[in-house]
Each structure stands twice: as structure tokens, then as C-alpha cells.
Amino acid sequence: MRLMEECFRWYGPNDPVPLNHIRQAGATGIVSALHHIYDGSPWPQEAILAQKAQIEAAGMRWSVVESIPVHNSIKLATTDSARYIGWYKDTLRAVARAGISTVCYNFMPVVDWTRTELMQPLANGGYALRFDAVDFAAYDLFVLKRPRVEESYSERQISLAGERLAEMDQAKIERIERNLIAGLPATERQFNRESFLTALAEYDGVTPDTLHDNLARFLREIVPVAEEIGIRLCIHPDDPAFSLYGLPRIVSTAADVRRILSAVDSPTNGITFCTGSYGTRADNDLPQMVREFGPRIHFAHLRNVQRENDGSFYEADHLGGSSDMPAVILALMQEQERRVAEDRIDWQIPLRPDHGHLLADDIGKERINPGYSLIGRLKGLAEIRGVMHGIATAVAQKA
Ligand code: DNO
């Protein structure tokens, strides 16, 4: 059985993890973006080519663009959106001219990925990212105090959050606030409490159906362009895969994916299969989702979360946690074989080990992108690689 393409995220020239270290991790592909242009304006061709040249000089290829940010006006379908959609198409064309054919994006309003803790100690001395649902509710209800916040919580959740708040000191509240609204790496906007409330207010009355319609409208514009220039689009799921701050979230479940794929029924309109995001819900059967959506999976993010009873989760080892990672990898490799039998040129699915624990010599480094230190991801990639080889060998011996 064929192996998937081993990629690694690189945040560009400012990433504290250099390309030569990524190469030592064994990756052959790079996942990157022009991270300094996140305001929806078009990416200059020369800047894309310069970043590509750096990647190639380090002996790898730029396999996936993650992400081209989708401007808020597009998510809200305001009159401004026409200009931003035009620029989005320009960026897609520039990326295609640079020879890159997979583009990841997301359609999460206001906040991208969200965690309450970036340094949750693990029993082995390392650290993990964590989302604590009770801390989150305590912040949302009693610190942020957005309008009608109680509607998002049950009475029991409100009382647990109140108890939690009473245990928190000021330092913890400030830390949680910073983690939640002041930006994890690759989030497009950084907020203070006031600007955050303003941003949330723009989504007042925007239901999941409206947001879906706005996504469908965007897809009807960009999919034909992407088809023409040979780009595969892959939407990243909500992380975590449930509503936060009362915001609509529309890429959380298998039903959501079905709806998006049928909104524009083209192979170009695909998904990023992020096991860590979909895995935050017990009702997402990950291997089954790979089997159902396989032909439209253009990119895989492999990482595991350990779900807890109250909606909290932490990022576990890549092969630990609540999801059966080998079963997901097997399903993805089977999808590749199905594509080969169909003569699809894009049979190989790029993967990246998503997030990693903060481990060993990375602990205490001054500059670290949370989740994106080297050693934890190197370990994750090595484990995933081991699973792939194990599967390939087992299948070959059976044949
Ligand atoms: C977090 C990432 C996300 C992702 C975007 C894709 O680690 O998975 O920030 O890049 O949501 O658009």
C-alpha cells in the first residue's frame, strides 16, 4: 500500500523552527502561507515564489497552502465581500502559477482554533494544549459578559462555572483571556475585550443556515476558478467542533460536511480531514467519515484529543486519546488505493502531524508557537510514519 505524503507546517521566515530541522524530522512537504498577509488582500506573486524558493533550497516542496484567510465580509456576505472575493481569486491564481495545487481555508467566524490552556502539564513532564469547557464558560459568562450569554448554557453549567470562577485568581483569568482572544498562531485577528465584543456583535442574528448560505455563495464564486487553474480547495473544520460564544459553526459534523460538499458538487470542493477537530465530538465516527468523504479529502491533519465528560479535552499523544488513529490512517491509505485504481493524479494525500506536545529541549525556549514546537511534532510524525509502514507491510504480507 502506498504511503501518504509527510508534511510539516512552517510559519515562514519568522518561524522559530527552521526548515533544516523540519527536514531532519523526515518531512518532504511543507505546509505554509504568507502569514504576514492575513487581511484579505491579494498575495503578491513574487512573495509566494520567494517563499517557495526557500522551501526548495532546503530540499522540500511546498505542498499545501494553509491558509488563505477568508475575510470577515465574505463570512457575513456584506457588500464589501465582492472586492475580497475578487482578491481571493487573485491569490488562488498566484498560488496556482507557483505550482501549488492544494489550498486549505476555514470559515469560522471571529475565532479560529481555541484553547484555554497552552501549557497543561502531562504526567511525563511535557506540556499539552487543553480546552477546559468549565473555564471557558466561566470566562464567557462572568468576565466577557457578552449580551444574552446565559442562553448558551444550562443552569448546571452556569452554576459549575460560577464555582470555578470563585477558585480562579486574577493571573489565571488574564491567562485564559489572552489564550482565548489575543490569538494563537495563525489566527487572523487579535482582540482586546472591547473589540472582541464588537466582533461578536456583528454575528448577532446570523444563524448556522445563514452562515452556510454565505459559504455556499463564496464556493459558487471560487470553485469554478479553482477548477480552471487546477487548485483543490479543502475547508478546515471548526476547532473545537461546537459553537463558542454563541457563534454559528457549520463545519463540525458529518452532516455539515455532506451539506457543504453538495452545495457545490465538484471534486475541487473538498475538505481538510482534521482528526483533532472532528475528534472533539464523540458522535463523529472518524474512520467512517474518511470512508464516506474519502474522494473529497485533499489534506489530513493528524492529531488526537482526549475527550473528558464535561466537553473539555486535551491534546493527547498522536496515537493516544479518544480517536483510533491507526484506523483513520488505514482508511486514508485505502482511499489512496481507490484513487490509484481510478487513475487519479492526485492519489497521494498530504498529511501533517498536527500540533505536538512541548517536550524535552523545547521546554523553556523563549520563542515557541504553541502546538508547533519541533520535538513534539517530530515525535508525532515518526509515530504516524510507523503506522503507515506497519499497515503497508502487513497488507503486503497478506497478499
Ligand atoms: C491550528 C490550525 C488552524 C488552521 C486553520 C485553517 O492549529 O489547524 O489554525 O490552520 O483553521 O484555516
Image (cartoon, grey):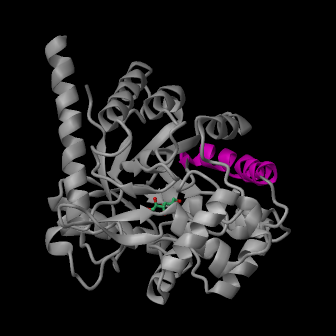
Residue sitting nearer the eye, 330 or 14 = 330
Relative to 199, 159 lies left or right: left
Q: Name the residue rendered at 69%, 85% in the picture.
A: 195
Stretch of the chain drawn in magenta = 208-234
Question: Looking at the picture, does residue 277 appear above or below residue 121?
Answer: above
Residue sitting nearer the eye, 39 or 279 = 279
Q: Quadrant of the C terminus?
A: top left
Residue 79: x, y in percent? Answer: 86, 68
Residue 370: x, y in percent? Answer: 36, 71
Question: Looking at the picture, does residue 278 appear above or below residue 370?
Answer: above
Q: Quadrant of the N terminus?
A: top left
Principal secondary structure, stretch drawn in magenta? helix
Question: Looking at the picture, does residue 317 appear above or below residue 159?
Answer: above
Q: Name the residue rendered at 20%, 45% in the picture.
A: 383
Residue 354: x, y in percent? Answer: 36, 55
Residue 284: x, y in percent? Answer: 52, 37
Does 114 lie within the magenta span? no
Residue sitting nearer the eye, 2 or 52 = 2
Q: Name the residue rendered at 64%, 85% in the picture.
A: 193
Q: Is residue 200 visible?
A: yes
Total marks in image: 0
Does 211 lie within the magenta span? yes
Q: Is residue 69 visible?
A: no
Residue sitting nearer the eye, 313 or 189 = 313
Relative to 121, 354 lies left or right: right
Residue 299 lies in quadrant: top left
